[in-house]
Image: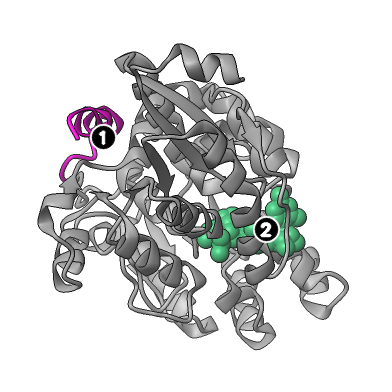
Amino acid sequence: MKKRYDRAKTMTKIICVCGARPNFMKIAPIMRAFKANGNFQTLLVHTGQHYDQNMSRLFFDDLGIPAPDVNLEVGSGSHTVQTARIMERFEPVVLDFKPDFVLVVGDVNSTIACGLVAVKLGVKLIHVEAGLRSFDRTMPEEVNRVLTDSISDLLFVTEQSAIDNLKKEGVNSEKVHFVGNVMIDTLLANKEKAQRSDVLRRLGLSEREYGVITLHRPSNVDDMAMFSQIVAAFEEIQKELKLVFPIHPRTRNRIKGNALAGRIEAMKNLLLVEPLGYLDFLCLMSNAALVLTDSGGIQEETTILGVPCMTLRKNTERPVTITEGTNRLVEITKEGILKGYCKIKIKRAGKNDDSSHKTPKLWDGKAAQRIVRIIAGA
Ligand code: UD1
């Protein structure tokens, strides 16, 4: 490895970090854009925060991401343990590679852990997907976002609200660049390919005749009373619309052996499946009648796909998906979810997509190219 580092003395050296499932679709177009530029020497570091085949490896395969140069293999743990372990294992990598920049994406524990290591070593930090705020500090991701932004040297944002938030927090506007959305770069690059997935056939589904569920936020799945309300709504909805639920390992662990697991398994029209790869999931989402989720990225993806999205959260850090997209927040009670479901049913009655949605500014598939151009000039 040393040899490789020396050969590229004139190139800009950059460590790109990924660690958890939603990071992989963000890092893919960035790695491609660095390669296309030709003036960067990249080191791809996977922290190993997510490690199951279907939470990590499948995404590298589906998205053609080069194999990580380094895997820190940190695995699961409490937030403190996970963050500390990433920091300890990342520091020697930075010391060895001596990068000009460290680039982190999103808002997971790997993002703040590696960001903090970079600045402590005096390396410039780049945050992709900066400025998003739910204003809910009980969300682990919100803390990660605020902290990462406050120590970053270059902040790339996806929507106007992020620029406004950073301005209010006193971030120098010269550091902030509105570039679009790298997650949407990946979606647009893979949309056609995803249609060739046979996931609908495998699961026995027909276009627009099912809903997709994803659920993993601690606020929903760690609180059994809350989770029970959500399950009660699913029990009603599945009486008229088939539901597919690729279950996150965290959610599966939470309900293992308790009454909720029994209720979920007892629903005749709810299909519980393992987490899917990127292309299968994109195909599933694009052909769905609606999506029920607590994910951040899925709010953005459904906006571009024109598929109605019910977000089971009190807030969203991605308000453009509501003002311009197909997203709506629903109250997390049985009644609240059913009310949201009925509104979608009435609005859509027979139509395949939500014709009122717009494409947010610069969500055009070129965000990664803009990012690399700006870093090259920095
Ligand atoms: C993490 C991110 C969250 C993101 C989500 C997407 C943080 C704070 N949270 O949450 O923002 O939306 O990823 O998935 O970084 N597990 C496995 N196999 C895996 C990974 C996890 O079984 O490959 C299980 C373990 O029981 C683990 C639990 O899931 O303890 C939670 O994993 P963790 O990475 O801590 O957080 P997520 O809930 O996945």
| Above or below, comparing residue 81 to residue 37 in the picture | below
- Which quarter shows the C terminus? top left
Q: Crowding at label 1, few (<14), some or many (≥20) Cα neighbours within 10 Å?
A: many
Mark 1 vs mark 2, foreground winner is 2
Q: Quadrant of ligand 1?
A: bottom right
Q: Residues within 10 Å of mark 2 (few under 14, many from 20)?
A: many
Dot 2 corresponds to which residue? 85
Q: Position of residue 237 (x, y in %)?
A: 56, 67
Residue 198 or residue 187, whichever sits in front: 187
Q: Write down the quadrant of residue 327 in the picture.
A: bottom left
Name the foreground residue: 309 vs 278: 278
42 or 250, which is in the foreground? 42
- Amino acid carrying mark 1 in the image: Ile
Instruction: Read off the residue under disc 1.
Output: 371
Say how the picture is coloured: one colour
User: Where residue 109 sits in the image (x, y, percent)?
Assistant: 54, 60
* Magenta stretch in the rendered image: 361-378
The residue depicted at 52 percent of the width and 32 percent of the height is 97
* Residue displayed at 34% across by 72% down: 134
Q: Is residue 214 visible?
A: no
* Quarter of the N terminus within the rendering: top right
Total labels drawn = 2
- Mark yes or no: residue 378 visible: yes
Query: Residue 86's image quarter?
Result: bottom right
In the image, residue 305 lies in the stretch drawn in magenta: no
On the image, the x and y values in percent for residue 264 come to 74, 68
